[in-house]
Amino acid sequence: MLVLGIESSCDETAAAVVSDGRIILSSVIASQIDMHKPWGGVVPELASREHLEKIDGIVSQAMADARVTFDQIDAVAITQGPGLIGSLLVGVCYGKSLAYGIGKPLIGVNHIEGHVYSVAFENPPVEYPALALIVSGGHTNIFHVPTEGQYKVVSRTRDDAAGEAFDKVAKMLGLGYPGGPIIERLAENGDPSKIKFSLAKISDGRPDLSFSGLKTAVAKYMREHAVVPQAADEEPRQEIMDLAASFQSTVIRSLVGTMEKLAIELQPRTLIVAGGVACNQALRSAAERAGGRLSVPVYFPSKHLSTDNAAMIAAAGFAHFAKGSRAGIEMTADVTMRLQNLENEDAELRRKKVKYRL
């Protein structure tokens, strides 16, 4: 069964053809990083305009690379949300029109669920129950997945996503955008124990995450120790590399420590670590060590499948298609689309006045 996947939730325009949810026949990605780099982050209006320019050519290239025709496609899977509204609408409108025009079923996919399925291509089948850490520039969540397609959020960030914190700290240090790869590179020559940053503590006792305080702690340290941001033409200074290493280490201890505590409680048979921040080798190594202590396998996507791509959307779409799921022509983009269909706690959280930004 062949599924054409289309992804446009943020700043990558992507299309892929996937067979039976596990074999990538083609995967084409047009990144906008160079366009947004001068602004230090994604500019939504520019992103949506670039998607409009690129999407038809990207889909055509994916079909050509896969050497298939639209007649051979069994379904079209598109990212429905969450994401930037302008970016999402480009993919949703294009995908709906394409599916209607070629007479194929349409499937709406949650972008975060796509990241869960990004491990499908290069790992053995996931054994359930699973615990999935999805960590990127826009999302940081841990999901309990008792069976395929069932999700309960067991931990999430109260403020910044981890990848967002990487970008903001990189900007403080004068390192440029995107911040994650730059901080990781500098951290290799830094001392992660040089600066003692505290892990966030959630006052209501929930196993949630928080990175805004860490970001503030970095700014406070720079101010109190007169650390000047790195100049563009300057060789990295040791104090900057130590700051990068200490910051990265604290983020990873928070993510992996929380995942490990939840794994002890929930006893998963598989750990999944995915999303753009899963490109970070230090995070991968820490997660593998945690999996070793727990005697639980840890699945990662390869690095090119960790960032946004359409192969993961096609894989998730295949799973929904196999269960009989279909979307109508009335489907539209959903900026705040949630991935939680098991034991929804929204009412309890409102009663306790627990607030989440993401």
Image (cartoon, rainbow, N blue to C red):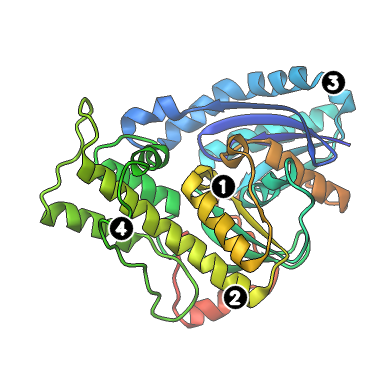
Say which of marks 1 and 4 sits in front.
4
Residue at left offset 81%, top offset 44%: 318
Any part of residue 329 in sight:
no
Going by the image, does 2 lie left or right of 260?
right
Residue on which disc 1 sits = 275
The answer to whether the residue labelled 3 contacts the one labelled 2, judged by CB atoms less than 8 Å apart, is: no
- How far apart, in angstroms, are the residues tagged by discs 3 and 4? 55 Å
Kind of residue sitting beneath label 2: Glu
The quarter in which the N terminus is drawn is: top right
Residue at left offset 65%, top offset 18%: 57
Q: Is residue 125 above or below residue 94?
A: below
Please state the horizontal and vertical placement of residue 16, each as a whole percent of the image.
71, 30
Residue on which disc 2 sits = 345
- How far apart, in angstroms, are the residues tagged by discs 3 and 1? 30 Å
Any part of residue 128 in sight:
yes
Q: Residues within 10 Å of mark 2 (few under 14, many from 20)?
A: few
Please state the horizontal and vertical placement of residue 166, each as a whole percent of the image.
38, 47
Residue on which disc 4 sits = 193
- How far apart, in angstroms, are the residues tagged by discs 2 and 4? 38 Å
Kind of residue sitting beneath label 4: Ser
Residue at left offset 42%, top offset 38%: 181
Say which of marks 2 and 4 sits in front.
4
